[in-house]
Amino acid sequence: MTPKLIHFVYVGGRPFSFIHFLAVYTAWKVNRPDKLYLHYSEEPQGPWWEKARPLLTLNRVAPVDSVFGNPVMFPAHQADVIRLQMLRRYGGIYLDLDIICLRPFTPLLAHDFVMGIEPGSGLCNAVIIAKPEADFLRHWWENYRNFDGSRWNQHSVVLPYVLAQSHPEQIHVADQYAFFYPAHNDPVHRYLWGQTPGLGELASRLLKNALRRLQQLFSLRRTPHPDARQRNFHALRGARWHYQRARQSYCLHLWEGLWGEPYLQAVTPDYLRQADSHFARLLREILSEDELQAFKSPGPLAPLPEAP
């Protein structure tokens, strides 16, 4: 079994927000891990950090400036390297700080290594489940010898997809609904935020899906492009279907870099208590009124309840 440990990585450069606190709190509340780690090169600051801190086991790590002699310049790439190093050492579940847990990852801990499909891109490293020194993890790490920071998601998303084609026995690939639904560029994401996708958006998406399906059917390549097998026609479904579909996911990825200004800045404890969006409704299924009220109180949280 994969150890019941959860890992977050923080390399500084951004305030520790309410969304980050929710990521930590829901990981603890939903999964009740043996330990909840934050691996950091610069300790966060701020009121939401003070609330999250009691839940976490802190592990300061050296800043990453290179990997196998290749320069690592961007904070996102530095975090990519640290998560693989920590998973190789400890094993467990890695989560980005914009992942909101909805259901326990327990059924997936029987696998040596798990990643999920990011539609249209590959396998996203925002959620990784791994035993220490898992074979797939070792292969992935060795490929960092060729790391090139100018290719933004090559080693974090594209490469694991390519490796999964070569070593399918070493990885369990979760479908697009497991971790990363709705995708940031899928018009049905508007349902999550209490909106309705425009007809033009839906028509464009359906046309692209149809073209990808034709590409898959008539392609002579042995390995289809990830778009070809990761898209479907769920844009034809209504709001209720998408809400029920989201409830079955293990987690929500909030795509912080893209959804920050249009959506995430509005998320507060009162928003979660009062809003009628799918996101607020999903969180109210996990968090009680008392918890949401406690989030509004200054200072650290009261002593946390034991696992049932």
Image: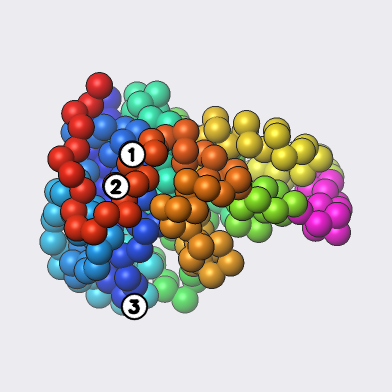
Q: Amino acid at mark 2?
A: Ala
The residue to which callout 3 is attached is 73
Q: Residue at position x 47%, y 76% from top?
A: 150
> Which label's residue is closer to the chain start, 1 or 3?
3
Q: Is residue 291 left or right of residue 194?
A: left
Q: Amino acid at mark 1?
A: Asp
- Are the two marked residues, 1 and 3, in contact with CB atoms closer than 8 angstroms? no
Neighbourhood count class around disc 1 (C-alpha, 10 Å): few under 14, some 14–19, many 20 upward: few
> From the viewer's perspective, is the residue at label 1 or at label 3 nearer?
1
Picture coordinates of residue 141 (x, y %)? 32, 53
Where the C terminus falls, by quadrant? Answer: top left
The residue lying toward the viewer, choosing from 289 and 10, is: 289
307 shown above or below 228? above
Which range is magenta? 197-213
Q: Residue 294 has which mark? A: 2
Q: Residue at position x 15%, y 40% from top?
A: 303
The residue to which callout 1 is attached is 290
192 shown above or below 151? above
